[in-house]
Image (spheres, rainbow, N blue to C red):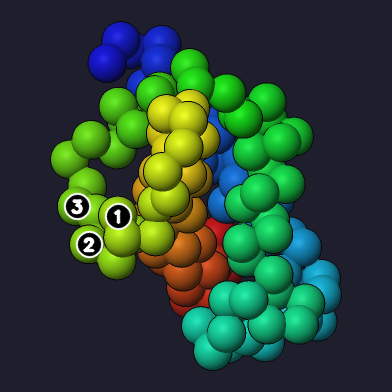
Amino acid sequence: MELHEKQYFEFLLNAAIERFSERLIQRKEGLENGLAAFRANPEGEGVWFSQFVDNFFEDMLLTNSASACLILEALEKRPIEQHHLDTLSTGKLKDILQTLAKQAFKELLFVKLQESLEQTLAYGV
């Protein structure tokens, strides 16, 4: 992966963390409530994590094969669970790439969001 691509991926990840955190804290009326709601049910009322990821991909123009390949290349060392592969339907390769990229990004974002919210809660950073 080229350095500029890695930098772009880091920008995307940090932008997603920042945008989701702001919305979550606002919707759940505080950082502690937001973190607790996110951990309890990422798809729950006011959290809507999957919907956020879908919207983020649309907003950042990541809904194409080239973007999917960029994300997959950035996350190439991350494991993928069998149940994700089982849920892939047959169809166009671009759709499969997009699904895999979105799922891989979502899993990393889930971990990084918790880390970021915990750090903010602990240190006010």
Inter-mark Cα distance, 1 to 2:
5 Å
Q: Which residue lies under the disc numbered 3?
A: 79
Q: Decide: few, some or many residues near mark 1? Use Cα within 10 Å; few <14, some 14-19, many ≥20.
A: few
Q: Which residue lies under the disc numbered 1?
A: 85
Q: Which residue lies under the disc numbered 2?
A: 82
Instruction: Name the amino acid, label 3.
Output: Pro
Instruction: Name the amino acid, label 1.
Output: Leu
At x 68%, y 26%, the residue is: 61
Q: Is residue 48 above or below residue 72?
A: below
Label 1 sits on a secondary structure element that is helix
Q: Residue furthest front?
A: 90
Marker count (numbered): 3
Mark nearer the viewer, 2 or 3: 2
Q: Residue 117 at what x, y percent from top left?
A: 53, 68
Mark nearer the viewer, 3 or 1: 1
Q: Is residue 72 left or right of residue 19?
A: left
At x 57%, y 23%, the residue is: 64
Q: Residue 5 at what x, y percent from top left?
A: 40, 16
Q: Which residue is at the front of the view, 104 or 34? A: 104
Q: Decide: few, some or many residues near mark 3? Use Cα within 10 Å; few <14, some 14-19, many ≥20.
A: few
Whether pointer 1 and pointer 2 mark residues with C-beta atoms closer than 8 Å, the reply is yes
